[in-house]
Amino acid sequence: MENNIENTDLVYKRAQKRVKEIKGFYSHLFTYIMVISGLVIFNLLTSPKYLWFYWPMFGWGIGVVCHGISTFNFNPFFNKDWEEKKLKQFIEEEKQQANKWK
């Protein structure tokens, strides 16, 4: 019974953390859209011949994309399957190393 309560608490905390991560991403995305929109308007009103707003849009955009990839676990190279395989590999290597010394 006590194990079930601990399990439920752990699941709840993980879900709570996940919701906080997603909320943080959407807050970041909203801020990005608002600030970049402001910069576009400011740039077009003050110096329309030189469009400099692309630079902060590009730089910050990379950050937003990375944040989204991290939040929604979309990483084709280092995903959960890769982590599991590496963990198993290292555990096996440790076992083999320990057996050599016996």
Image (cartoon, rainbow, N blue to C red):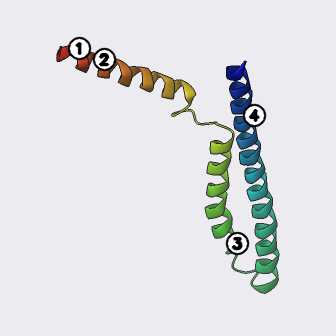
Q: Which residue is mark 3?
A: 53
Q: Are the residues flagged by discs 2 and 1 in contact, CB closer than 8 Å?
A: yes
User: Could you tell me how far apart the alpha carbons at marks 1 and 4 are, in whole angstroms?
Assistant: 40 Å
Q: Mark 2 or mark 3, which is nearer the start of the sequence?
A: 3
Q: Are the residues flagged by discs 3 and 4 in contact, CB closer than 8 Å?
A: no
Q: Mark 2 or mark 4, which is nearer the start of the sequence?
A: 4
| Picture quadrant where residue 60 is located | bottom right
Crowding at label 1, few (<14), some or many (≥20) Cα neighbours within 10 Å?
few
Front-most of residues 95 and 7:
7
Q: Which residue is mark 2?
A: 95
User: Could you tell me how far apart the alpha carbons at marks 1 and 3 are, in whole angstroms?
Assistant: 61 Å
Q: Secondary structure at mark 3?
A: loop
The circle on residue 11 is none
Crowding at label 3, few (<14), some or many (≥20) Cα neighbours within 10 Å?
some
Q: Amino acid at mark 2?
A: Lys
Q: Which residue is mark 1?
A: 99
| Picture quadrant where residue 6 is located | top right
Q: Which residue is mark 4?
A: 12
Q: Amino acid at mark 1?
A: Asn
Please give left or right for residue 27 compared with residue 94 in the image: right
Could you say where residue 91 lies in the image, as x and y percent from the top left? 37, 21
Front-most of residues 98 and 48:
98
Q: Mark 3 or mark 1, which is nearer the start of the sequence?
A: 3
Q: Are the residues flagged by discs 1 and 4 in contact, CB closer than 8 Å?
A: no
Q: Secondary structure at mark 4?
A: helix
Q: Amino acid at mark 3?
A: Phe
Crowding at label 2, few (<14), some or many (≥20) Cα neighbours within 10 Å?
few
Could you say where residue 36 lies in the image, as x and y percent from the top left? 76, 68
